[in-house]
Image: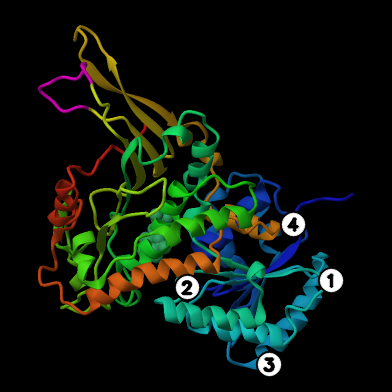
Amino acid sequence: MKTNKPKSIIVIFGATGDLAKRKLYPSIYRLYRSGKLSDNFAVVGVARRPWTNAVLRDNVKESIASFKNDNIDHDAFSSHFHYHPFDVTNIESYQELHTLLNDLDGEYHTEGNRIFYLAMAPNFFGTIAENLKSQGLTSTEGWSRLVIEKPFGHNYPSAKELNEQIRQAFTEDQIYRIDHYLGKEMVQNIEVIRFANAMFEPLWNNQYISNIQITSSETLGVEDRGRYYESSGALRDMVQNHILQMMALLAMEPPIKLTPEEIRSEKVKVLRALRPIEVEDVNNYFVRGQYGQGNVSGEELSAYREANGVDPESNTETYVAGKLLIDNFRWKGVPFYIRTGKRMKQKSTEIVIQFKDLPMNLYYDKASNVHPNLLVIHIQPDEGLRLYLNAKKGDHGTVSMPIAMNYNNSSKDKMNTPEAYEVLLHDCMRGDSTNFTHWDEVALSWKFVDIISQAWENSKANDFPNYESGTMGPKASDDMLKEDGYHWWNVSNRLD
Ligand code: BG6
């Protein structure tokens, strides 16, 4: 019987690492549990450590231990996993892997389909891609795809160099660059909310929207990633990818078809219209912050500069706020405010669309301000939508009060909302690259961000640390909006 469930071997480089254990193995398991994966799959874990199949399988079972009441045989599932000790610079390693993949192809009837998933430090991405091709691992009867985790380069020149290297071995349509935000349910929903509702799209422009705010705040600090983070900072870690991707989805024109090419081309147009910032203007449009100590619920939290691997005089930002302007017909004059940071008050990602005030409103309470209409898209932890309207309530005469209409996706179906990695792995197996970033998007995002990072690298932030752990960031970020007559909407991230 013909089945459209994907058949493939997934080769995971970095199989002993944290990402594989925390995200990839559980995601493969969930795909298996939901029947989205046929029995014709094998996973080959590749890494330097001298593990065996048994060690890898134990690791996989540990990673899915919380799903113990599923009625799925965890031994049977993990028997699909095979381990191959590997040295990325040694040609023989590739030849041995080649033989193993051919054997597994026969055993699992995977028809020569292969995903090479690079879940490891980026230094060797180029070498691996080149060797996979030169040693024939990508020449099969089926398809071969390369999945690449971020960071994709450190700036535009290094990203370009990396891209040129991997393009020697893989074509653009074989490359799946991960931005895990694009796998999140409510990020994917931005497009649907905008283009499947008659009531939003006519208002979605500079005639009716005053500003858009994107906030992605985290409560954790850099934990044990100090060394990586020192060379990254919040701008490269979050803005270049996740935040600019969300902005592009919010600002793009409706695609003419739901194909990866059409959608990406609309996103690329937004990134092309993003107004570049002059180096000397960076501090008028962007605010940087670094967390200091703080006390949250009685717990003393240490400063960024005290973390392992971090320079005690570090100039690295753990917080960024910015004002982005898109110079096109739809968005001219509408600021997109963005902010993201570590050690903030709450873990939450949300988007607020603030509509313009009416030209005349007789119904508002003169003692307080007009309450603008807001559409809030809750990305996480709750997933849903909240629309703030004004209506008359109780005995307040004709004075309007804000009311909220909620749609809570997660309270209804929390168990079934797929994890970002699960969605993205499944998309990759099906050959759908819509929710992966095209090189053109990566290139434009780096070019935009590079000017800001250069300006910041060349000038010491004398006020660092400038926000306490457990707060919503430096005051300068609030001031930036105040100057424009706005403020951040710290709407609750609870939808109940
Ligand atoms: C990653 C960053 O890309 O995204 C991390 O490298 C950050 O620093 C993470 O913590 C946030 O992802 P999420 O899904 O928890 O919002």
Return the mark for residue 148.
none
Compare marks 2 and 4 and give the one earlier in the sequence.
4
Residue under label 1? 106
Q: Closer to the N terminus: mark 2 or mark 3?
A: 3
Sequence order check: which comes first, mark 1 or mark 2?
A: 1
Tell whether label 4 touches label 3 (CB within 8 Å): no
Q: Position of residue 59 (x, y in %)?
A: 56, 66
Q: Is residue 132 above or below residue 236?
A: below
Report the predominant secondary structure element of the magenta stretch: loop
Residue type, label 1 = Gly
| Residue identifier under label 3 | 92
Circle 2 residues within 10 Å: few <14, some 14–19, many ≥20: many
Residue linked to disc 2:
152
Tell me which residue sits at (50%, 83%) in the image: 161
- Three-letter residue code for mark 2: Phe
**Left or right: residue 288 compared with residue 265:** left
Q: Classify residue 68 as left or right of residue 133.
A: left
Mark 3 belongs to which amino acid? Glu
**x 14%, y 56%: residue:** 476
Q: Is mark 2 within 8 Å of ligand 1?
A: no
Quadrant where the C terminus is found in the figure: top left
Dot 3 lies on which element?
Answer: helix
Task: Say the numbered circle drawn on residue 6.
Answer: 4
Task: Kindly report the distance in space between the C-alpha atoms of the residues bearing marks 1 and 4.
Answer: 16 Å
Q: Is residue 18 visible?
A: no
* Residue positioned most to the front: 329
- Does 478 sit left or right of 172 as displayed? left
Work out which residue is located at the far right of the displayed protein and give it: 1
Q: Nearer the viewer, mark 1 or mark 2?
A: 2
Q: Is the distance from the Cβ of mark 4 to the nearest ligand 1 atom less than 8 Å? A: no
369 is within the stretch colored magenta: yes
